[in-house]
């Protein structure tokens, strides 16, 4: 069973308990009825059927506050030089971007954590495309601010065959300009369900935007995607198309 299908089924089972963060639907940047965003939009709609108006208001407010920061405009963009990083994987082994780039382009997927079903669906979608990415000479890594034990949870639960790295303290996310602050109201809403301090090892309540980058061997960013709404993610097909162009020298 493809990883994405398996995670969709699991996500539906735990829909109400795991993710209180769904307000009105926001369309993805790619209108693909069979793509990742269509699956995420369906999940948003299912949750919204049962969400309280208070929860919807709090999340709409949180997304609006992220937008007001201008983070989408100030984050690293196409043409920028990617920040070098070395981070531990789920087994505690250091993984350096420079070493990965020695072997070809690298897709970097920032995600919020193992507790986020949208992230799990996204990681599963990338797993389903891993063979294609590698066939085009690319590599794939995912980064979250979680402690390595929780990165291991992400890797095991989603059956991921690519490195899942721990950016404890959001230092790399900060360098890419994608760190955001969870509002106190949402932190309170999460009480008893999502403990960011336990997952991330600090009390900052900061998370990265779920950003996606394609970095070429010279360290240049060739594809960049993020959205104020954490439920809107890059389509793997769009990144793969750009990866194919890189292989063709475009």
Image: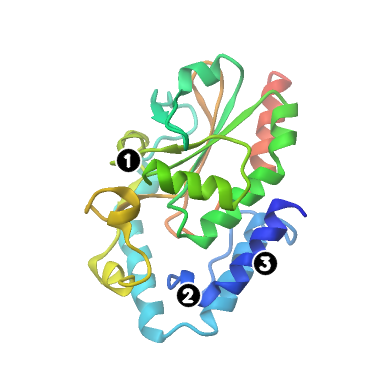
Q: Nearer the viewer, residue 123 or 221?
A: 123
Between the C-alphas of marks 1 and 2, the distance is 26 Å
Above-or-below relation of 199 to 132 = below
Q: What percent of the width, then of the height, locates residue 176?
A: 37, 35
Q: Residue at x 41, y 78 (%)?
A: 56
Write down the residue under mark 2: 17
Q: Earlier in the sequence, mark 3 or mark 1?
A: 3
Q: Nearer the viewer, residue 219 or 138?
A: 138
Q: How is the image coloured?
A: rainbow
Q: Give the quadrant of residue 115.
A: bottom left
Quadrant for the C terminus, please: top right
Q: Decide if residue 122 is in sight here.
A: yes
Q: Nearer the viewer, residue 9 or 153?
A: 153
Q: Secondary structure at mark 3?
A: helix
Q: Earlier in the sequence, mark 1 or mark 2?
A: 2
Callout 3 environment at 10 Å: few (<14), some (14 to 19), or many (20+)?
few
Above-or-below relation of 59 to 85 = below
Residue 168 circle label: 1
Above-or-below relation of 217 to 9 = above
Between the C-alphas of marks 3 and 1, the distance is 30 Å
Q: Residue at x 33, y 72 (%)?
A: 192
Q: Decide if residue 70 is in sight here.
A: no
Q: Decide if residue 32 is on the left or right side of residue 155.
A: right
Write down the residue under mark 3: 9
Q: Residue at x 49, y 23 (%)?
A: 220
Q: Secondary structure at mark 1?
A: loop
Callout 1 environment at 10 Å: few (<14), some (14 to 19), or many (20+)?
many
Q: Secondary structure at mark 2?
A: helix
């Amino acid at each position: 069973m493809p990883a994405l299908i398996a995670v969709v089924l699991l996500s539906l089972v735990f829909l109400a308990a795991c993710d209180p963060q769904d307000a009105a639907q926001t369309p993805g940047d790619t209108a693909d009825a069979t793509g990742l965003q269509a699956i995420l939009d369906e999940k948003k709609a299912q949750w919204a059927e049962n969400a309280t108006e208070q929860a919807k208001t709090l999340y709409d407010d949180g997304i609006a506050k992220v937008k007001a920061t201008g983070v989408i405009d100030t984050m690293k963009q196409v043409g920028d030089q990617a920040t070098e990083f070395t981070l531990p994987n789920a087994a505690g082994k250091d993984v350096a971007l420079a070493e990965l780039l020695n072997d070809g382009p690298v897709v970097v997927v920032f995600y919020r954590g193992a507790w986020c079903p949208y992230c799990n669906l996204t990681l599963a979608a990338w797993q389903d495309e891993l063979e294609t990415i590698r066939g085009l000479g690319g590599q794939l890594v995912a980064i979250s601010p979680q402690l390595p034990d929780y990165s291991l949870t992400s890797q095991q639960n989603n059956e991921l065959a690519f490195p899942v790295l721990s950016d404890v303290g959001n230092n790399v996310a900060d360098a890419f300009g994608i760190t955001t602050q969870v509002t106190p109201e949402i932190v309170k809403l999460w009480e008893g369900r999502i403990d960011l301090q336990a997952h991330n090892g600090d009390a900052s309540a900061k998370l990265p935007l779920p950003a996606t980058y394609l970095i070429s061997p010279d360290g240049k960013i060739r594809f960049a995607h993020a959205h104020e709404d954490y439920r809107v993610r890059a389509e793997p097909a769009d990144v793969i198309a750009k990866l194919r162009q890189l292989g063709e020298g475009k």
